[in-house]
């Protein structure tokens, strides 16, 4: 039985397809449309999934599942507007017409859009709840036979957080925190206030936090929320604007933190650093309290997590190190995109009652390499058609050649295998460089990614060597855990950080013998690489170890700021030429920037891609 899952119309639309419970394919629409966080119906992602599942045009899957219940969301909106009336009229007038003309008619809309994609819709469409889809995406692909399941995000229909229990093929909710009291929206409010984009810049706030001190933590806990021992809380909505306005925070919030919100792209001050640190620590405290409650009320040894807050890898790392659970597994596409996959899995296992096997060791995500791939023949034809200059590497020479180039301080755009599902590049669509270089973080931030200087980079590390570099004793294949760099590898700080607000100067100070991936608090967001799902990338790291003694590289997503991760060879070449990358690898083909003819960008990428 083939089941197609769909998420769309809010942000990060995606499609996923499973066959008899096995994940076949999954992809976000943004990768095809080149619009970051694209919310439109995932037409191209659906076409890709159908093709990958071997379903001919004009035919359809056995079932189609949408990732939430729109009628319940509409009910929540109406109740909210009535509760705050007459405030919120502008927001009401903007939202309700869209719902009445479009979003309430999801089922016929889906049928129409599927028909446009050449897909025959089945007789019945399914609509699990939003957090059920999140929970299913976390539990069913996990390695665990039984687990507590925690979901945390902005809001679904009503739920903002849930605690549930997964056992075999069954999942059910045991506790729920409802709108407007949302950890995801609280974090997004601070994202907005510090000058970053909501639903896009939350990871920047997390990356900024280590530069600050938690001087506002007590103020947040005293004024903004009433936090209980079990992790539940109530927000004081008089400080927020998302109920009755079109903004996240209001003037009262600004007065509490000493002035108006930071303007986007303006200088980041000590205030923003300290605010980021403060809300990050509050978030971690709430996550830990919810986790303890989940352990207490479920009695389970293992935890699964999904929802946008589950992408907070700093909190995840502290949760793992707390020992509350024996192990934690987080859905790599934890946000709304992953809801498409969870919706399909929920119907297969929970609704239809089909069995599920788990060995408490191996997950079912296939490394999250679930997107499109391209053959050498396809790539060579494209290269030759366009007259690009390349060298074809033999398989035996591929890893040693790239290792030599990296060791010589070159930056490489790496395009190999299937594209990743979720927000992290995992060696399929990555930009890589030498983690030993003290200058590489600055070079990659400012000359390659064209992004803020303070942003940290993640390491890809041989799975078998991770404990040599970091204080972690298990794999982290999806780059969802932050762990400290080992003490013996650290460089003592000069001790004058609090005297500097210049983030460029601050971030470029070497802090370990792998300085390019060591953040200012001696932490790193780790991806471990084993031979099972990406053997080529594993061989590259082995070649790096043979060449340099370090089986580790910088790994950042293959894109410029504001651009979705590249999907096709054409996307990769365009990004390569727009930046100061030295080499591009398209499967077996190596392209050197200096060998290419002068390339005129047909578009100004800064105008094409809205800054995140």
Image: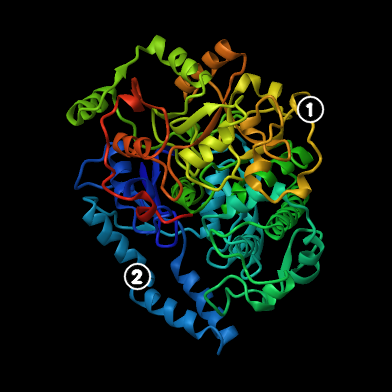
Callout 1 secondary element: helix
- Residue 200 as seen in the image, left or right of residue 302: left
Residue at image position (56%, 86%) is 87
Mark 2 or 1: the one toward you:
1
Whether residue 29 appears in this view of the structure is no
Residue 598 locus on image (x, y percent)? 27, 34
Q: Pointers 2 and 1 in contact (CB under 8 A)?
A: no
Could you say which is closer to the camera, residue 10 or residue 129? 10
| Colour option used | rainbow
Residue 312, numbered label: none
In which quadrant of the rendered view does residue 471 lie?
Answer: top right
Whether residue 289 appears in this view of the structure is yes
In the rendered image, the vertical position of residue 419 relative to residue 221, given as above or below: above
Could you say which is closer to the camera, residue 498 or residue 170? 498
Residue 127 locus on image (x, y percent)? 43, 60
Which residue lies most toward the bottom here?
A: 86
Q: Total label count? A: 2
Residue labelled with disc 2? 105
Residue at image position (47%, 28%) is 411
Q: Earlier in the sequence, mark 2 or mark 1?
A: 2
In the rendered image, the vertical position of residue 130 relative to residue 417, given as above or below: below
Residue 84 locus on image (x, y percent)? 59, 84
Instruction: Say which quadrant the N terminus sits in.
Output: top left
Residue labelled with disc 1? 487
Could you say which is closer to the camera, residue 42 or residue 249? 249
Callout 2 secondary element: helix
Residue 69 locus on image (x, y percent)? 46, 64
Cα distance between the residues tagged 2 and 1: 57 Å
């Amino acid at each position: 039985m083939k089941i197609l899952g769909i998420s769309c119309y809010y942000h990060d639309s995606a499609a996923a397809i499973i066959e008899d419970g096995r994940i076949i394919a999954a992809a976000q629409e943004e990768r095809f449309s080149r619009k970051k966080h694209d919310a439109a119906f995932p037409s191209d992602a659906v076409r890709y999934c159908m093709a990958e599942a071997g379903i001919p045009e004009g035919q359809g899957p056995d079932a189609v599942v949408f990732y939430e219940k729109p009628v319940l969301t509409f009910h929540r909106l109406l109740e909210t507007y009535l509760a705050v009336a007459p405030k919120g009229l502008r927001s009401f007038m903007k939202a309700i017409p869209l719902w009445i003309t479009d979003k309430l008619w999801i089922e016929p809309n889906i049928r129409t859009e599927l028909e446009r994609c050449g897909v025959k819709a089945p007789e019945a469409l399914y609509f699990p709840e939003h957090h059920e889809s999140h929970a299913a995406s976390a539990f069913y692909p996990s390695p665990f036979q039984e687990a507590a399941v925690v979901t945390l995000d902005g809001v679904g229909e009503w739920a903002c957080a849930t605690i549930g229990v997964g056992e075999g093929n069954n999942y059910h909710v045991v506790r729920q925190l409802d709108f407007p009291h949302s950890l995801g929206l609280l974090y997004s409010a601070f994202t907005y206030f510090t000058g970053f984009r909501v639903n896009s810049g939350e990871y920047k706030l997390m990356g900024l936090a280590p530069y600050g001190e938690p001087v506002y933590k007590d103020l947040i806990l005293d004024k903004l929320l009433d936090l209980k021992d079990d992790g539940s809380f109530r927000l004081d909505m008089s400080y927020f604007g998302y109920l009755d306005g079109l903004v996240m925070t209001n003037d009262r919030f600004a007065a509490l933190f000493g002035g108006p919100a930071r303007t986007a792209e303006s200088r980041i001050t000590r205030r923003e650093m300290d605010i980021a640190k403060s809300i990050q620590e509050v978030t971690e405290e709430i996550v830990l309290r919810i986790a303890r409650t989940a352990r207490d009320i479920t009695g389970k040894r293992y935890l699964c997590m999904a929802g946008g807050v589950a992408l907070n890898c700093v909190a995840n790392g502290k949760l793992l190190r707390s020992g509350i659970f024996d192990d934690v597994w987080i859905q790599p596409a934890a946000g709304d995109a992953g809801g498409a996959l969870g919706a399909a899995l929920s119907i297969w296992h929970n609704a239809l009652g089909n069995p599920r096997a788990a060995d408490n060791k191996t997950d079912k995500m296939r490394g999250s390499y679930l997107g499109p791939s391209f053959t050498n023949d396809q790539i060579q034809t494209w290269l030759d058609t366009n007259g690009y200059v390349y060298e074809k590497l033999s398989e035996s020479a591929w890893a040693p050649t790239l290792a030599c180039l990296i060791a010589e301080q070159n930056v490489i755009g790496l395009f190999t295998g299937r594209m990743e599902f979720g927000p992290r590049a995992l060696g399929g669509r990555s930009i890589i460089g030498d983690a030993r270089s003290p200058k590489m973080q600055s070079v990659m931030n400012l000359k390659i990614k064209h992004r803020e200087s303070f942003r940290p980079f993640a390491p890809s590390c041989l799975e078998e060597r991770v404990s040599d570099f970091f204080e972690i004793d298990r794999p982290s294949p999806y780059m969802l855990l932050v762990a400290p760099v080992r003490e013996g590898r650290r460089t003592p700080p000069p001790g004058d950080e609090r005297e500097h607000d210049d983030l460029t100067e601050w971030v470029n100070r070497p802090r370990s013998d792998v300085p390019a991936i060591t953040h200012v608090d001696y932490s790193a967001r780790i991806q471990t690489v084993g031979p099972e799902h990406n053997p080529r990338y594993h061989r590259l790291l082995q070649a790096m170890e043979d060449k340099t003694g370090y089986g580790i590289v910088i790994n950042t997503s293959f894109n410029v700021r504001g651009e979705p991760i590249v999907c096709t060879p054409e996307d990769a070449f365009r990004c390569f030429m727009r930046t100061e990358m030295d080499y591009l690898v398209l499967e077996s083909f190596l392209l050197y920037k200096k060998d290419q003819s002068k390339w005129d960008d047909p578009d100004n990428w800064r105008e094409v891609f809205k800054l995140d």
